[in-house]
Image (cartoon, rainbow, N blue to C red):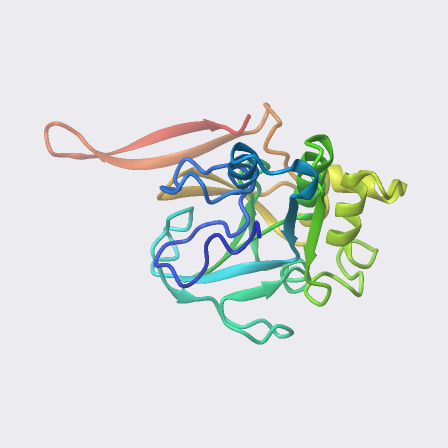
Amino acid sequence: MTYDFHGSWEKKTGHHAQFYQSPRDLNPSLNFDSAVNHWLNLGANSSKLVLGIPSYGRTYTLADKKINGFNAPALGPGKPGLETAEGGINGFSEICQDNSWILFPNDLIGSYSVKGDQWVSYDTPKMAVLKSRYIRDSGLGGAAYRFFHTDDYQGKCFGMSFPILRSIQYGLGVNDEKDFETSEDDTKTFLGKMQLAILIDENRSVVIKEENKYADVSDSDINLKLTETVRTDSGQEEVKELKVNAG
């Protein structure tokens, strides 16, 4: 079971299905990669290891909407979705259709999105491909998909039904549909729905807004200018410009 590592039963935000260890996670074992290595180190047969990939997100209500990264203080579960109707969980179909979310993409740990005081972590189709390729390349037994009803089964976000499931199949090499070339770079598709944000540190983030609503965090020509109020040695406040390169 490589999901539900974190959730609203905790007082701080954390990615519930993180791929590799987050430097902010105090428990190094709560991630996809560490779970695999744990069992292999114990002598488990790799062909008998089946790794879970979720089609839902775990949600929180933030204590302070301005502090919204990993390990941000949380009051409890996020608001129920219209379909899942349960606090603390949103289906991928609910997340990807809501254009008020701001996306923080991360291919090593996992993506999360923020909307006011609401916070959700989840696997994107791209992450499903990456995890499935990891399974295939490591000679593991396969992937366990959870659930059908929380995936975008009506195909409202990507023009195809069950994008998480199809991405798993594509990553495992059992589905060679050309449609899944978009799964390699689904951030573009997401930004048709969401704005993109970059986390500067635990207390600061910046939302990128371009004319086409798309900016790849790997683009070296994206320069973000921020200002920060600092106190000098003499006790006076001074506005200081910060230059942040997204690449």
Q: Nearer the viewer, residue 182 or 10?
A: 10
* Residue 221 shows up from this direction: yes
Who's the residue at 59% across and 49% down the image?
195
Quadrant showing the C terminus: top right
Identify the residue at image location x=59%, y=38%.
44
Tell me how many marks there are: 0
Q: Determine the residue located farthest toward the top in the rendered image.
A: 220
Task: Let me know if residue 192 appears in the view.
Answer: no
Question: Residue 150's quadrant in the figure?
Answer: bottom right
Q: Farthest right residue?
A: 177
The answer to whether residue 181 is left or right of residue 196 is right
In the foreground, 113 or 17: 17
Q: Where residue 58 sits in the image (x, y, percent)?
A: 52, 59
Q: Residue at x 55, y 39 (%)?
A: 39
The structure residue drawn at horizontal position 78% and vertical position 64%, both measured from the top left corner, is 153
Q: Is residue 187 above or below residue 67?
A: above
x, y percent for residue 19: 56, 40
Q: Position of residue 131 (x, y in %)?
A: 66, 40
In this picture, is 32 found above or below 77? Answer: above
Q: Position of residue 11 (x, y in %)?
A: 34, 59
Relative horizontal placement of residue 132, taking residue 177 as reference (left or right): left
